[in-house]
Image (cartoon, rainbow, N blue to C red):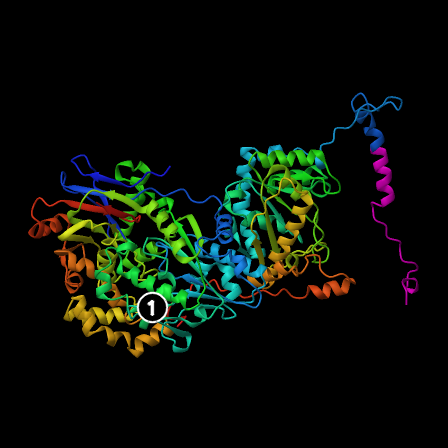
Amino acid sequence: MARPGFVLEVDRSTPPILTWHGEGFRLERLPAGRSRVIYAPEPLKPLDDPDEEIRQALLHPMGDSAPLPDLLFAGMRLTIAFDDISLPLPPMRRPDNRQRVMEAVLEMAAAAGVDDVVLICALALHRRMTEAELRHAVGDRVYDAFAPSGRLLQHDAEDPAGLVHLGQTDQGEDVEINRRAAESDLLVYVNINLVAMDGGHKSVATGLASYRSLRHHHNVRTMRHSRSFMDQERSELHSSNWRMGRLIAASGVKVFQIETTLNNDAFPEQMGFLQKREWEWTARDRGAYLATTKSLSLAPPRVARSIFQSIKAPHAMTSVYAGEVEAVHRATTDMVYRQQLVAVDGQTDIAVFGLPHLCPYNVNSIMNPILVMCMGLGYLFNLYRGQPVVRRGGVAILSHPTPWAFHPVHHPSYIDFFEEVLADTTDPVEIEKNYEARFANDEWYRHLYRTSHAYHGVHPFYMWYWGAHALEHLGRVIIVGGEPRSVRRLGFSPASTLADALEMASDVVGRDATITHLHCPPIMIADVS
Amino acid sequence: MTGDDLAGGARPQRRLPVSPGWLADARSGLRGRLRPLSSFPLGTPPWPATVARPPVERTLGTDYDSDWARSPLARTGRAVVQEVLAAPLVKLLAAPTVTGVDRLAHLDEPVIFAANHASHLDAPLLVSVIPDRWRRELFVAGAADYFFDTRIKAASFAFLLNAVPIERQRVSRVSARRVSELLEDGWSMLIFPEGGRSPDGWGRPHRAGAAWMAQRTGRPIVPVHIEGTRRILAKGSSRVHPGRTTVTFGAPLRADPAADPRVLAVRLEEAIAALADETANDWYTARLRAAAGTTPALTGPDGADWRRAWALGRPRRPERSRRRERWPWNA
């Protein structure tokens, strides 16, 4: 039986704690008597026969939806949309949940004699996936059946002919989504819910939307009023998506939602020590840790990055639900909480976040400084329910090398954002007001997004907005071991060691400040009382 | 002009110093001289014609005891031979592309692999590509009358493939009991339900042995389709033509305890036919045809031999790019 999450009060007998540091990790000793470490729950038991569970979910849907076979008929237009490369993290071993679900759906479509089937990768403003990445997500069988005939598409948020405007919500939000999806007799959405933020109406309303539609909820105001993204009841991001989703349904788009959850078994057996509590490390774990850290310290950054990017997680499916969007999403969110929630008593003065090598936007790519900010202040800071782990005016200490490095193909607009925009200001409101429109409508970025593998021109802005709530909430942000000029460009303070960072933090929160370290990954959500 | 016309008269007749007749005489004489040494009491006594002979203990065919081939020593030796010699050789000769392994990802119990059969290469090919989880504890169901008719052949196949003799002409309790005991002991089985290699490239009707075993033991059957081995080593050919092959694993089938095993045998045959269709076309087309009941049969069309050979045609396989595309090559 999987053990639940756990909060360790650090005392003199506590061993040094593993802290992620990009493509590597460190053992850091936390001050005794005023520090605590939050450990994630252990991985839940996976489904014994996921294929059969998927079939049963399709045959017995939730909410007011009819079973999938009853919705399929010869001569219909069927569109199957699926999540892109940003999920799950790290990418899971084959077969991916998307492949299992899509094959089950297509089996039923074949049984009904459906010929007009199109698959769409719902990538919103993310980069186009490569053939290898698509094959990994949907499997070779599906890829070979649909891609050669042009029936496996990637959503294009900048194709005027491929989008349809469905109207405005009662809050004046434009809803513009993929035309093929909107005009199909049935839209099946295949989802992987890695965290509570994923899925629900956000799948279609964000994944298949255009910039014109996305800007209504991907903005500073919405992000600052989402507390947090992991708590849909208190997330303005979700409220906006829900309004849009309901308008999509009211426009006649029939959506059959399929959501799957994963356990948090994130690392292969050889790196099992990354998921264990330090005092439970065996001799083998200690040997693996020493061998890994030593070899990584000798390897050039490029090699280390390749090693980490090649990690395929042994994630396993823990549940699958299908049917009406909101009913499905309630059940899925409960399952995500079951895997990830850890009860935490009260806030802290200083939060320590070790940043891993990966965030949703640098799979097979480089974690550039903007993504470091987004990962630390956008994602890890927001892994809470109730209230943030760190108190208002507190300090966040991030640990990451933060190199001044960008992937020129994947992140072209990030380079200009970093060089030009952040050199001027780091205030999200100023950035949004003065620069967003220019980047969003830049023809060159638009061209690269549509024809290459580049994130949309506006994407680095969204990354910055993602951290807007944390920037407003925190008194100071310190990055341990980061490249000083990159860290300063972000508007943060560089520190060489954790001890230095704690010393610097004491200027803001005093010398006896309490410290909380989020031992993440694996992913958890702190349920802060 | 002949030799007789030469000056000096007739040409002298030339004889070998050892002629066949001389050899026969010498052998007969030698046998006569050695007979006392081989006859009773030095040799075996003759059996009196009036006394009934006891039944001869059969040690070949279905009676061959291959238990020794599953001893730790034999398993280690076989693993070394398979990994060091057989697998590289198979890769060289057959260049297998393996698909569908992901369909077995959630299985963690012994299974019955059932494949179509066109060449002697099929068994070594499958033994080299079956996932590790099952490969080390895998036995091959071999035709008792073909692979176990002499002591040398029986020992060789038992060692190299962990082959177990199966009676293919009739139902044999000995074969059935041995195979089911192995399946229940945690071994997986590789079997060719057609009962022999295809003579013309088309499949042959399946026998129900694999399905019957699945029903009896509760183990799932994994349908497997092999494409391309006949071009490398066809039945009746002694020449090997290296080429490319495709092995496709299908979704496991489970027996319904209440149903007739022949129903499962039919499902198995249909599943392998669908895998063949998937290999020749694409997965969704194959599923559409399977759902409509129009999957091309493995046994090919009826008609004259030439028409069946004609219908076999050239294999049609989509090109599958495995290259990981990276910028700038894919720009």
Q: Quadrant of the C terminus of chain B?
A: bottom left
Question: In the figure, is residue B180 to the left or right of A258?
Answer: right
Q: Is residue A313 visible?
A: no
Q: Position of residue A223 (x, y in %)?
A: 24, 62
For disc 1, the chain is: A
Q: Which residue is mark 1?
A: A125
Q: Position of residue B90 (x, y in %)?
A: 57, 52
The answer to which image quadrant residue B50 occupies is top right
Work out whether B67 lies above or below B297: above
Question: In the figure, is residue A506 to the left or right of A190?
Answer: left
- The residue that appears at 39% across and 66% down in the rendered structure is A248
Q: Nearer the viewer, residue B11 or A333?
A: A333
Q: Is residue A115 visible?
A: yes
- The residue that appears at 50% across and 60% down in the rendered structure is A140
Q: Quadrant of the N terminus of chain B?
A: bottom right
> Residue flagged by tag 1: what amino acid is it?
Leu
Reply yes or no: does residue B4 show up in magenta.
Answer: yes
Label 1 neighbour load within 10 Å: few <14, some 14-19, many 20+: many
The answer to which image quadrant residue A280 occupies is top left
Reply yes or no: does residue A308 show up in magenta.
Answer: no
Question: In the figure, is residue B231 to the left or right of A275?
Answer: right
| Residue at the extreme bottom of the image, as rendered | A443
Q: Secondary structure at mark 1?
A: loop
Magenta segment: B1-30
Q: Position of residue A364 (x, y in %)?
A: 35, 61
Q: Position of residue A396 (x, y in %)?
A: 17, 53
Q: How many marks?
A: 1
Work out whether B326 lies above or below B153: below
Work out whether A509 lies above or below B180: below
Question: In the figure, is residue B271 to the left or right of A4?
Answer: right
Q: Nearer the viewer, residue B249 or A517?
A: A517
